[in-house]
Image (cartoon, rainbow, N blue to C red):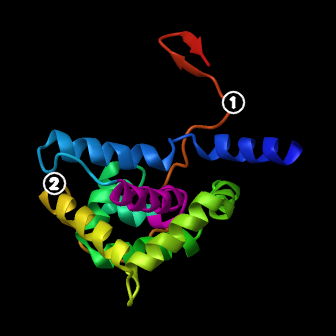
Amino acid sequence: MKQMHRNRDILDEVAEDGHPSEAALEFRKQAIRLGIVKEVSADAVDLAISWAWLGKAISRTKASVRWGLEGIDANTFEFIVALGKSHALRATAIADATSAEALSGRREELLKIRKLGGFLNAVNQCQNAAGVSIRQIDVLRLSELSYIAGQMPGSSVTKIHAVEISNILAFPGPAKGKKRTTKGNSTA
């Protein structure tokens, strides 16, 4: 029971910006709303969730600055759209999610994400879909996501360029436990 409680705490802590499935479901909703498809298969949504896990990890790394400079927020459905449009972006996302250096103050959080079963499974799925000998199921769901992403408005970025980021400030997010004040009122 104690181990289960500890895992729940880790999941709660890394879920501050939402679960990766939220970005994938927003991608699905936008594809349907725009009339691109009537439905997105469960297999394609599953791969989109895997891509969103990569984005969750990237958002805690210094690589997130490069993605941001290209106009891609790794925590949104637009990240899924971008990966659907480019094999090079998918390869970069896998590398950044698994090995990029943590942003200042986000190291512990990034390590927790990289140890989660959901993240490890997602990396495995992404590597399978990006490999040389792709399984038929991966071809089908990759082609579905690529088709949908190609029809969606948004970024036409196909490669994340290396940039010097030592002189760029990246704010890690709100401090935990701090109270915000709005117009003189204190809120939790």
Q: Is residue 51 above or below residue 5?
A: below
Q: Give the residue furthest to the bottom.
A: 132
Q: Which mark is residue 177?
A: 1
Q: Position of residue 48 (x, y in %)?
A: 38, 58
Q: Is residue 26 left or right of residue 105?
A: left
* Residue that numbered label 2 is attached to: 152
Label 2 with label 1: CB-CB less than 8 Å: no
Q: CA distance from mark 2 to mark 1?
A: 39 Å
Earlier in the chain: of badge 2 and badge 1, it is 2
Identify the residue at image location x=42%, y=57%: 46
Nearer to us: label 2 or label 1:
2
Q: Is residue 52 magenta?
A: yes
The N terminus - image quarter? top right
Q: Report the front residue among 101 and 48.
A: 48
Span colored in magenta: 42-63
Is residue 48 among the parts visible in the rendering? yes
Identify the residue at image location x=13%, y=50%: 36
Is residue 163 among the parts visible in the rendering? no
Identify the residue at image location x=39%, y=76%: 129
Q: Report the front residue among 156 and 162.
A: 156
